[in-house]
Image (cartoon, rainbow, N blue to C red):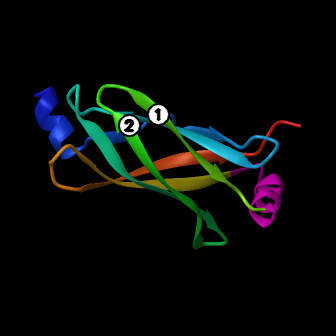
Amino acid sequence: MCEAFAATNPVSVASRTLRVAADGRLQLRISCRAANGQLCRGRLTLSWLVSRKRQTLGRADFTVAGHTTGVVTIVLSSTQRRTLSHARRLRGTTTIVARAGRSPTVRTTTAVVIRAKAD
């Protein structure tokens, strides 16, 4: 059953709450559920809602070995950091388009909370 689930949904976001570092870097841990010896490859897109409008914060390509976790880093612009510092936290969405080995490409969307750095 685990292998069937990995074939349909190979990559997931490991943490639902994301913190922005002082330099504007946002690190997301992702886990690959593919079998050992296979790689999960794809693209992660992070977006948030500001004034009922969806804005893309950034995109990053990744490659993670099977049954391991990896870190994807997205750097926020100064305008994005300022918006987040005023709000302190915003709801966001991660969209991962990935594939494991030769399996078909799968799109996964996860709700996350993005928090401003601690002062």
Dominant SS type (magenta): helix
Name the one closer to the observer, 12 or 87.
Answer: 12
Residue identifier under label 1:
70
Amino acid carrying mark 2 in the image: Val
In the displayed structure, 56 sits above or below 12; it is below
Q: Is residue 80 magenta?
A: yes
Name the residue furthest right.
119
Q: Secondary structure at mark 2?
A: strand
Asked if marks 1 and 2 touch (Cβ < 8 Å), the reply is yes
Name the residue furthest front.
37
- Residue visible at 15% across and 48% down? 102
| Horizontal and vertical percent position of residue 20 | 72, 43
Q: Is residue 109 magenta?
A: no
Q: Residues within 10 Å of mark 1 (few under 14, many from 20)?
A: some
Name the one closer to the observer, 29 or 41.
Answer: 41
Residue identifier under label 2:
64
- Residue visible at 82% across and 53% down? 85
